[in-house]
């Protein structure tokens, strides 16, 4: 490479460094100003810069450097890619800063614009994981080669000499890497449709002590609707229509109706919920996103036909058979959850020989609940893993699942079972990647009839 080309390459990379430093500083200062003068919740945006935006910038820098080496610092393709990238960076930053506004800028949510931030961020998020995986693979390969050289020094030298790639092979591999870098963008683009491709999933759950009188009870389990942004009125009405078409006996919600926004953004939610019909009504607990104005939410839910169970239990009569429904508020305390849950559930009095379904937003709490406090626990919160590979109806390969957090499907602990839905909506970046949303229809079966 000539000195002139090297200088151009250095200048191109340096320009990208300066741009991303400015981008991160802009987000950090803007979020800090919002935190100080507008809303304390902007502290999450402040924390988002080092946790999420700086890794994003690192992935951007890596890909830009690769494109420079392949296309040349002065190529028209690289210039177009750089300009478009800066435009998309700006849109993403503005969408992040205005995401919780009750009346976001119309331009940022126009057709063809509203998904740019999510697409852009999620694609580079996938690239970041790819770079991390390649780094681990290269490290393991290096260790393996050193071990081979240690045991077979002479043979390893010949093998390393034979393995040296020719210039043509090296160029082919580099060009293949440039094409492969586009895969995350295609994957993110395909996830736009997936994110709101609501699927009605039917399941039979066999419960050991479930009475035969309630065998066949159909429960619609909805969670994490997250009204606001792209979860607009048409999508909410579609969720209501799909739920009604499944003909449930009862509808149970496990929280996160809202998205930490301001204003009357949530009004379409109540219109949609009011259209859902079930003979034994709609019942709910509250999730972690529902506490900006919980009393207002509970009042609006009640007007829409949804009864909220806030750390209490109630008894229904279904064809003469009693059924207890219980609901727990989301606990923000990280420690001594088992003691807090025990205190709440003990306040309900001794457990009667009556079947009970418990609504609790956070599936991580399942192992801390008192034993025999319910026959079935319903949870959401994890959005099915949010990003991963859906292997079957109830199994996925997701980072959340690999960390040991219940992401979807049926779980057992002691004498209880918990079902975790993939949820209806989603919140924040990235959008759903590979994990479709669902409306869960659970037919509860008695083991005595099985």
Image (cartoon, rainbow, N blue to C red):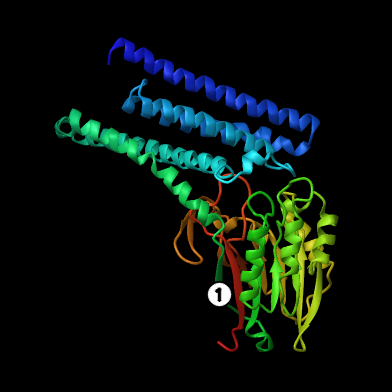
> Where does residue 179 sit, x and y in percent of width and height?
33, 39
Q: What is the quadrant of residue 22 in the picture?
A: top right
**Mark 1: few, some, or many residues within 10 Å (few <14, many ≥20)?**
some
Is residue 336 visible in the rendered image? The answer is no
414 in relation to 89, above or below? below
Viewer-nearest residue: 440 or 448: 440
Look at the image and tell me in which quarter the N terminus lies: top left
Residue ID at (14%, 33%)? 162
Tag 1, which secondary structure? strand
359 in relation to 230, above or below? below
Q: What is the quadrant of residue 357 in the picture?
A: bottom right
Query: Residue extending furthest top?
Result: 3
Residue ID at (32%, 15%)? 5
Q: What is the quadrant of residue 25 in the picture?
A: top right
> Where does residue 296 sit, x and y in percent of width and height?
84, 55
Viewer-nearest residue: 64 or 256: 64
102 in relation to 441, above or below? above
Q: Which residue is mark 1?
A: 203
41 in relation to 264, above or below? above
Residue ID at (78%, 57%)? 340
> Where does residue 407 sit, x and y in percent of width and height?
56, 58
Q: How many marks?
A: 1
Viewer-nearest residue: 340 or 436: 436
Quick check: 293 left or right of 368? right
> Where does residue 284 sit, x and y in percent of width and height?
75, 65
Is residue 294 visible in the rendered image? The answer is yes
Look at the image and tell me in which quarter the C terminus lies: bottom right
């Amino acid at each position: 490479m000539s000195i002139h080309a090297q200088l151009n390459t250095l200048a191109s990379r340096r320009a990208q460094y300066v741009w991303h430093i400015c981008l991160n500083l802009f987000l950090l200062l803007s979020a800090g100003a919002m935190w100080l003068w507008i809303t304390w919740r902007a502290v999450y945006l402040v924390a988002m810069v080092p946790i999420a935006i700086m890794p994003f910038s690192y992935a951007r820098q890596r890909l830009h450097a690769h494109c420079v080496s392949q296309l040349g610092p002065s190529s028209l393709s690289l210039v177009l890619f750089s300009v478009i990238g800066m435009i998309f960076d700006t849109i993403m930053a503005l969408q992040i800063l205005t995401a919780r506004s009750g009346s976001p800028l119309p331009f940022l949510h126009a057709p063809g614009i509203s998904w740019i931030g999510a697409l852009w961020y999620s694609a580079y998020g996938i690239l970041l994981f790819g770079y991390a995986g390649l780094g681990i693979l290269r490290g393991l390969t290096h260790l393996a080669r050193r071990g081979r050289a240690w045991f077979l020094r002479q043979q390893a030298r010949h093998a390393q000499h034979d393995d040296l790639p020719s210039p043509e092979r090296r160029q082919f591999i580099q060009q293949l890497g440039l094409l492969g870098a586009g895969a995350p963008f295609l994957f993110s683009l395909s996830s736009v449709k997936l994110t709101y491709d609501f699927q009605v999933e039917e399941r039979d759950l066999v419960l050991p002590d479930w009475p035969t009188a309630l065998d066949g009870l159909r429960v619609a389990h909805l969670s994490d609707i997250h009204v606001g942004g792209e979860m607009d009125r048409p999508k909410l009405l579609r969720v209501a229509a799909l739920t009604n078409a499944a003909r449930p006996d009862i509808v149970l919600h496990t929280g996160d109706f809202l998205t930490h926004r301001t204003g009357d953004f949530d009004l379409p939610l109540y219109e949609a919920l009011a259209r859902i019909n079930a003979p034994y009504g709609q019942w709910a607990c509250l999730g972690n996103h529902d506490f900006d104005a919980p009393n207002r939410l509970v009042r609006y839910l009640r007007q829409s036909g949804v009864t909220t169970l806030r750390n209490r239990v109630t008894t229904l009569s279904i064809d003469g058979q009693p059924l207890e429904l219980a609901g727990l508020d989301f606990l923000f305390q990280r420690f001594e959850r088992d003691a807090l849950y025990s205190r709440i559930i003990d306040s309900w009095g001794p457990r009667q020989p009556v079947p009970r379904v418990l609504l609790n937003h956070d599936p991580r709490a399942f192992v801390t609940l008192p034993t025999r406090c319910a026959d079935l626990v319903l949870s959401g919160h994890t959005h099915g893993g949010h990003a991963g590979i859906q292997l079957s109806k109830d199994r996925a390969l997701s980072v959340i699942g690999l960390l040991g957090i219940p992401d979807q499907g049926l779980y057992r602990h002691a004498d209880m079972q918990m079902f975790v839905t993939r949820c209806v909506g989603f919140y924040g970046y990235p959008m759903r990647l590979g994990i479709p949303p669902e409306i869960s229809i659970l037919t509860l079966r008695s083991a005595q009839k099985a």
